[in-house]
Amino acid sequence: MTAITASELKDRLAGLEPIGLGEGGTNRLAWTGELAAAEEWFRQQARGASLRVERDPAGSLWAVPDAPGPWWATGSHLDSVRGGGRYDGALGVAAGFAVAERVPRVAVIAFADEEGARFNTPTFGSRALTGRLDVGDVLGRVDDDGVLLADAMRSAGADPYRLGDAPAWLDRLRGFVELHIDQTRELERLGAPAGAVRSLAARMRLALTFVGRADHAGTTRRGERRDALAAAARVIVAADELAGGDDDFLVTSSRLFVEPNAFTTVPSRVRLWIDARTPDGERLSEWRDLLSQRARELAERTGIEIELATASHSDGVEFDARVLAAMPGLPELVCFAGHDAGILAPRVPAGMVFVRNATGVSHAPDEHVELADAAVAAEALRATLEALA
C-alpha cells in the first residue's frame, strides 16, 4: 500500500481551494452557490474512491462504501467562516478520501454548516445527527440579508421538514475520526508534525441585546442618555474581567451590530455575541451566571434594557480511549475549538488527529499548514482507522 503524500493531498485540494477564494480569504457559507460547487468536488472525490454519495436529512454529504454499514467514518466540513482559510475543514475531507481509498469499509462525511457563520448555527450537521439541534429554533433563523434558514436549505436541495429525521442516520456509524489543522501553536512548540486530541474544552456562545434610546450626540447631557453601546462596552469588559487571570479561560467579544450607527446619534440598540471557552465546564457556567448578574445590575443603573441568552453551549468532551490508543505514538493535546467529532463523541467512539500549524493562524486568509505535516497526520489517521475498522 502506498503512503499518503504531500503531493497527493495537494492534488486533491487543487479542485477545492479556488472555490470561494478571493483577496479577503475563503467564503463558502452554508447553503450557498460556493458550497454547492464544493459539494460537486466532494462527489468527484467519492467517484475516484468508488464510494456512493448520499445526503442526510440535515444536508450533510456521506460518501459510503458498497459494503453494508455501520462503518467507521472520517471527514470534516466544507463550509468556511467569512474570510476564512484554505485548510480548515477542507483538509480533513481531502485526507479522508485519501484514507478511504486505502482502507476498506471507511466512509467520508462532509458535515453541513459546521462553522455556523451564516445563521449562527455551529456544528449544525453533527448536532442534527445526534439529536442535539433545536429544529424549531434553527429553521426560523435569518441571515444578515433576511433569508430564512429553512428557505436556504430548500434552495440548496435539502428538505428542512426532514431535519428532525437526521438522528436515524447515526446508527450507520461505528465511530468517527476527524483530521483537522491545529488552530494553536501547540504542536509547533512540541516540535511534532501531528498530534492526538485528548479532549475538547467546554464552550459557550452568548447573544445579548441592548435597547436604549436614540438622542443627539452633541446636545444630550450624560444624565439624560440611554446609550446602548456604552452599556455593551461595560459588559464586554466585565466578561473579560470575570475570567480572571486564567490563561486557559478564553473570552472573545466576537460580533457587534450597532443601531443607528450614525456619527451624531447616541446608539439606541446593540446586538453583541460573546464566546467563552475553558476546560473547566463548571467554571464556565459560574462565569455566565456572574455576567448575567452584572448585566442586570447595569440595566437597573442605566435604564438600558439588556437581554442575555445562551446561543449555544457545549460541554467539555473526552475522546474515546480506544481511539486514542489506536493512534500511533502521537503527542496528546487539549483543543479549545468546537468540532463535529466532539459533538459525536458522547454518542459514538470518536477522536481527532491534528496537523501542525506553525503560526497558529486560523479562520483567516493567512492560515497555513505544510502539506508534508498533513501527510504525516493523514498516515496516522489511516493507521488508526485500519486498527479500528
Image (tube, rainbow, N blue to C red):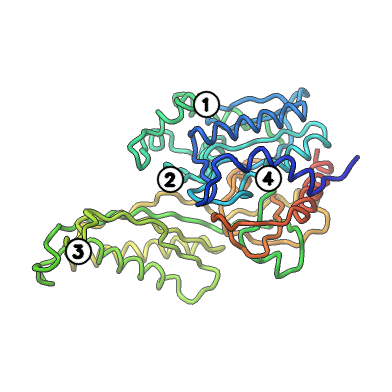
Q: Earlier in the sequence, mark 4 or mark 2?
A: 4
Do the CB atoms of the residues marked 1 and 4 lie less than 8 Å apart? no
- Give the CA separation, mark 3 to mark 2: 26 Å
Q: Residues within 10 Å of mark 3 (few under 14, many from 20)?
A: many
The label on residue 227 is: 3
Q: Which of marks 1 and 4 is nearer the N terminus?
A: 4
- Give the CA separation, mark 4 to mark 2: 22 Å
Q: Which of marks 3 and 2 is nearer the N terminus?
A: 2
Q: Quadrant of the N terminus?
A: top right
Can you tell which of label 1 and label 3 is closer to the viewer?
3
The residue at which mark 4 appears reads as 92
Can you tell which of label 1 and label 4 is closer to the viewer?
4
Q: Name, please, the residue furthest toward the right.
A: 1
**Residue in view at x 46 percent, y 46 percent:** 117
- Give the CA separation, mark 3 to mark 4: 45 Å
The label on residue 165 is: 1
Q: How crowded is mark 4: few (under 14 residues within 10 Å), some or many (20 or more)?
A: many
Q: Which of marks 1 and 3 is nearer the N terminus?
A: 1
Q: 64 or 345: which is nearer to us?
A: 64
Can you tell which of label 2 and label 1 is closer to the viewer?
2
Residue 305, position in %: x, y?
21, 57
Amino acid type at circle 3 is Asp
The residue at which mark 2 appears reads as 120
